[in-house]
Image (spheres, grey):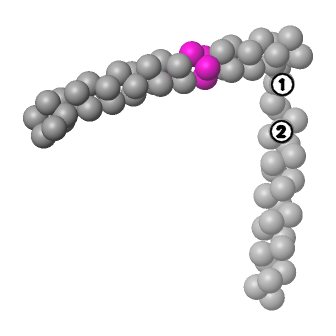
Amino acid sequence: MKQIGLIKEAFNFFEEVKVEFSKVTWPKYNEFVGSTLIVLLLVVLFSFYFFAVDSSLSFVMKKVFTSYFG
């Protein structure tokens, strides 16, 4: 009995998901491509930024430790 109730709940859940998906306004192709390119560009820029900061801090820390403990 309990399994039948779970199956009905799951079926109702997916029916509600189907209704909600029909309400979604999906972006046009050009909007999708533009947004994707912006995100990829930002990922690349932040990657270079964090690489530069990490490399700089690593260089400074090596100099500090070698001057004190070297």
Q: Main secondary structure of the magenta part?
A: helix
Residue displayed at 82% across by 32% down: 23
Judging from the image, what secondary structure is the residue with disc 1 in? loop
Tell me, for residue 40, which label it has, or none: none
- Splitting the image into 4 quarters, where does residue 59 fall? top left
Judging from the image, what secondary structure is the residue with disc 2 in? helix
**Above/below status of 12 relative to 26:** below
Amino acid type for the residue under numbered disc 2: Phe
| Dot in front, 1 or 2 | 1
Who is closer to the viewer here, 70 or 60? Answer: 70
Question: Dot 2: few (<14), some (14–19), or many (≥20) neighbours within 10 Å?
Answer: few
The magenta segment is 42-46
Tell me, for residue 26, which label it has, or none: 1
Amino acid type for the residue under numbered disc 1: Trp
The residue beneath circle 2 is: 21
- Image location (x, y in percent) of residue 13: 79, 58
Residue displayed at 26% across by 32% down: 62
**Residue 36, magenta (yes or no):** no
Who is closer to the viewer here, 36 or 48? Answer: 48
- Image location (x, y in percent) of residue 68: 10, 35
| Outermost front residue | 70
